[in-house]
Amino acid sequence: EDKVVQSPLSLVVHEGDTVTLNCSYEVTNFRSLLWYKQEKKAPTFLFMLTSSGIEKKSGRLSSILDKKELFSILNITATQTGDSAVYLCAVEPSGTYKYIFGTGTRLKVLA
Amino acid sequence: NAGVMQNPRHLVRRRGQEARLRCSPMKGHSHVYWYRQLPEEGLKFMVYLQKENIIDESGMPKERFSAEFPKEGPSILRIQQVVRGDSAAYFCASSPWTRAISGELFFGEGSRLTVL
């Protein structure tokens, strides 16, 4: 059965810290992996990764995919209280559009 | 350009009643997805629709649940004879992408159903 596992489940850090969120997956015929940020409403898109070893970067956030070891990481540097959210990882098996989501990592950044 | 619009945002029903959740995709998007999120769990795929067609409903319970996306108007997720276990947040997402192109889903803010 296809599955996506995220770790840690939750994390509490102080402003300025750097965090690394993990996403491992087992899917048939991988097509893409996506990261979303979910505050108390709609998940908002962060990154889409399809190729191994190519880092995607947006401000203080970056992400990379390892298709051999079947995982991705999301890094957030110099965290701010506004980064507090649940970070969701989703994987799309080829041609299905049935994105499979992990349970998320709940990040809390303390001032 | 308005985002994905869902309504109602909150819905309270008693056991046995019907719940109807509506979703208007982003302008220009012809693909709609419904996901369910239980407390402390990830988003679970329910159904994928294009205009007037159900493409994949493998994540939807066989009984009491139905979905449609008519030629005109919003997509509707309908839950008949609700039970307490149906209490969840129901998210709609849309995309303009065809199967040939991979891309992100654009989510609405969700409809939170509470069954008393």
Image (spheres, coloured by chain):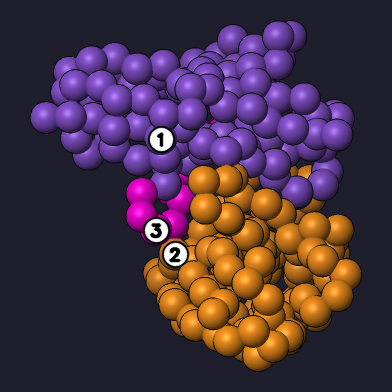
Chain colours: A purple, B orange
Of marks 1 and 3, the one in the foreground:
1
Name the residue tied to disc 2.
Answer: B109
Q: Where, by quadrant of the figure, is residue A99 drawn?
A: top right
Same subunit: marks 2 and 1: no
Q: Which mark is residue A41?
A: 3
Callout in the foreground (2, 1): 1
x%, y% of residue B106? Answer: 53, 56
Between discs 1 and 3, the one toward the N terminus: 3
Q: Amino acid at mark 2?
A: Glu
Q: Amino acid at mark 1?
A: Arg
Seen at 42% across and 29% down, the residue is A10
Q: Are marks 2 and 1 in contact (CB under 8 Å)?
A: no
Cα gap from disc 1 to disc 3, whole angstroms:
14 Å
Same chain letter for marks 1 and 3: yes
Crowding at dot 3, Cα within 10 Å, few <14 / some 14-19 / many 20+, comes out as: few
Quadrant housing the C terminus of chain A: top left
Q: Amino acid at mark 3?
A: Lys
Q: Which residues are magenta?
A: A39-50
- Asked if residue B34 is positioned above or below residue B21 in the image, the reply reads above
**Which residue is under mark 1?**
A106
* Label 2 CA crowd tier, 10 Å (few <14, some 14–19, many 20+): many
| Res. B30 image quadrant | bottom right
Q: CA distance from mark 3 to mark 2?
A: 5 Å
